[in-house]
Amino acid sequence: MNWKIITWYTGVALLLVAALMTVSGVIALFTPGDGSRAPLLLSAFLTGTVGVFPLIFVRKGAHRLSFREGNSIVVGAWLLAGAFGLLPFLFYGHEFSFINALFESVSGFTTTGASILNDIEALPRGLQFWRISTAWVGGIGIVTLFSMITIGKDKSTLSGAEISSLARDRFSGERNGRVANRMMLIYIFLTLATFFSLRLSGMGWFDSATNAMSACSTCGFCIKNTSIAFYANPSAEIILTIAMLAAGLHFGILFLSIFKGRPSAFFKSEVIRVFLISVGLATLVVTADLMLNGGYSSFASALRDAAFQVASISTTTGFATQDTTLWPPLSMATLIICSLICGCSGSTSGGIKTDRAILAAKGISRRVRMTVDPNAVVPLRIDRRVKGEEQLSEAYGYIIFYLLIVVVFAALNIAFGLDFTTGVTASISCIGNVGPGFGEVGSMSNYAAFPDILKLSSLIEMLIGRLEIFPVLYLLRSASVN
């Protein structure tokens, strides 16, 4: 591998991180009494200095990136973003020890939304914006974002390395670079639409901006201790529910529907239908359970809370309007299932993805049919596209690895003192980039009480989940071969 070119591109990623720190620092400068000015601007200077060195001393040349190099750049950019992203938190101090600062940084960039903060509202505005900025950049992808300024075949290689093949499949016939551009356009459109809608609902400009960025990145970071419950604003809850669901859909289909005048693409998509029907059924189950066993006397209230929480967990956002650890067992079990499968490929959602679940289910169904009729020819199709054996094997492998990682990290959590419910749901939430689980990590709780060893293991699990497992395995295999 050409380590010079890898260093050059990871330097660009750090400059992007430094630019966001600078924006947050400027917000702090214009906020009276904001104590995060110096931490943010100093962090921006240090990060920018490290990032600019490769651009000065390393000649990029005309080298064309290989897939292996592109994969290394993607993994390296995420690791460095998390590492340098801790600096503003660490310099600010207070609750932020080194491990806590690293946890908060990685949680933001991976859009997990898990936090170690006991008092989020005590953070100065500049640091709150930085916290949300990490999530917004993480939602679309660090490399995808800086590839916007890259031209030529390298742009395509970088986008292809970060955007999964499952996500790119919806853009059949398009170059990887154009795929990244279209996804970015939809991302900005959703964020702005959510921001203006929240402003119309009566929410303040800063709250509207941060909640819009968090919803569209499906992170769930909020500037209030009690999350969205703080606002007690039904209109804002409806807007955020729609925004979370939209961010959990494939951006390619949204692009065709919104910018290409082809709304039929939205309604004809099997994956979107399955996802939205699943969300609807889960909402009805939780609503009924809350009415029968949750102490709700109003159907409207039960439906409102159920719809918001199901949408939040199904899209791996993690916003909360209620403490779901107090809900009946059936509602909790439904939310756990939602946090496993989650949204569609090509979205900002984490989890196994609806596409993989459909493909695996159809593969099993085909195997059963061929057992009865060995001569049957049963092609696998999703949204009228035939899927090959390689794609089916990849879906099976991903799901197996995913569940294996859940089990391993859950066992680690329990071994270091967590109760069963907390240990298992924390593992599911971290690998799926969901954030809240149940037990000690419920929707109104946090990860502050975790011992440092579990905070470290949890952030590793977040990174594995955000990178969708295979890039990490590929890099580990390449390193072992070398």
Image (tube, rainbow, N blue to C red):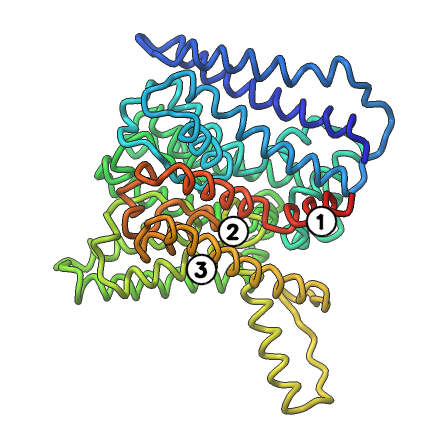
On the question of residue 47 being in view, the answer is: yes
State how far apart marks 3 and 1 are (Cα). Answer: 37 Å
- Circles 2, 3 touching at the beta carbon (< 8 Å): no
Q: Which of 127 and 252 lies nearest the eye of the viewer? A: 127
Location of mark 3 (residue)? 276
The local secondary structure at tag 2 comes to loop
* Dot placed on the residue nearer the N-terminal end, 2 or 3: 2
Relative vertical location of residue 232 with respect to residue 122 in this rendering, above or below: below
* Dot placed on the residue nearer the N-terminal end, 2 or 1: 2
Relative vertical location of residue 373 with respect to residue 257 in this rendering, above or below: below
At x 21%, y 39%, the residue is 232
Location of mark 2 (residue)? 249
* Eye-nearest disc, 3 or 1: 1
- Circles 2, 1 touching at the beta carbon (< 8 Å): no
Crowding at mark 1 (Cα within 10 Å: few <14, some 14-19, many 20+): few
State how far apart marks 2 and 1 are (Cα). Answer: 32 Å
For residue 130, which quarter of the picture? top left
Location of mark 1 (residue)? 477
Q: Quadrant of the C terminus?
A: top right
The local secondary structure at tag 3 comes to helix
State how far apart marks 2 and 3 are (Cα). Answer: 9 Å
The local secondary structure at tag 1 comes to helix
Q: Is residue 7 left or right of residue 29?
A: right
